[in-house]
Structure formats: C-alpha cells, structure tokens
Image: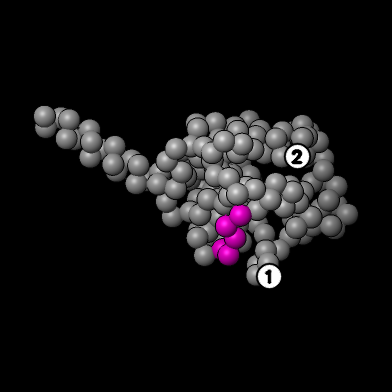
Amino acid sequence: MNRFKSIVILAVVLSELAGAVPAANASDVAVVVRRDLPVDNLTFSELRNILLGDRQFWSSNVRVTLLIRAPLAHERDVVIKNILQMTESQFRQYWIGKVFRAESLASPKTVYTNEIAVSLINNIPGSIAFIEAPLVHKELKVVRIDGLLPGEKGYPLN
C-alpha cells in the first residue's frame, strides 16, 4: 500500500512538471514561447512565415527569436519537413541566402537540448521554440496552431 501511494505521488509530480500538454502524443511537437508573450494561437501559415524569417516581429514589436533544435533532432525534422517541406540541406541554404542578402539579421539559433531551449525562451523575450510535447515545462506557454494543441485530432506537428 505504501509503495502504491509513492507511485501515485510520483505520477502527480510528473504530470505537474509536464503540465502544459498532458494528453499529447509522444511524436507531437509543441510550439512554445514565454508566458508573457501576447500570442496564444498562430495559423499554420503564420508559423511558416516565422520559420522562413518573413515575420520578424510579434504584434507587440518584440523581435522574434527563432530557436530550433540541432540537426538529427526529432523536433527539427518535424519542423523542416512538415512545415517548410524542405530537406535539411535546403533549409541551411535558404537561411545562408537570407542572411547573405541582408533579409534577416540572423539565422535561427541552434539549441542542442530541450533544457537549453527552455532556458533561452525564459531569458530572451520574443523567443519561439519547438519541443516534444510530453517534455514541455509548465513555465512555458504552448501556442495553438490553427486552434489546436498537441494531442488534438488534426494537430499538424507530428
């Protein structure tokens, strides 16, 4: 009985840590920002424009800082293939050209772990990142895509 109680407490603590997206599929990728950023929903098209560097400011005139996982990470693959419909090579070439032509001040910042992404989101106003939905920390805001959250039917990032 005591062991059962410990397991229940552990489950509650873990669900509090994940908190933001409890019913998400393991393969779903959540779009996350700081809680104080005034954005709750993006259309798929708006998200694509952010990833392409065509939208560089939030409506509040805060600069968008794009954080994206390093190559080979599941989150990066989902973003590049599902949203941009590009290969890794095309994505790199696209951003090299965009910065070279001075169409953007900087390319996306590469993050190597979800923990680094969380830290940067909390420290850089306007940051946006992509994290496997079950690993989202409760201090982050999960942005709806076309009104959908990870785990909901029709969610596009999986």
Q: Residue at x 48, y 54 (%)?
A: 140
Of the pair 106 and 147, the residue shown nearer to us? 147
* Three-letter amino acid code of the residue under disc 2: Leu
The alpha-carbon separation of the residues under discs 1 and 2 comes to 25 Å
User: Residue 85 location, x and y as percent?
Assistant: 77, 35
Question: Which amino acid is tagged 1?
Answer: Asn
Q: Residue furthest bottom?
A: 61
Q: Earlier in the sequence, mark 1 or mark 2?
A: 1
Q: Which mark is residue 61?
A: 1
Q: Residue at x 51, y 43 (%)?
A: 114
Could you tell whether 83 is left or right of 24 in the image? right
- The magenta stretch spans which residues? 37-41
| Disc 2 target residue | 84
Residue at 57 percent of width and 57 percent of height? 40
Q: Name the colouring of the figure.
A: one colour
29 drawn magenta: no
Q: Quadrant of the N terminus?
A: top left
Q: Residues within 10 Å of mark 2 (few under 14, many from 20)?
A: some
Q: Is label 1 in a helix, a strand or a loop?
A: loop
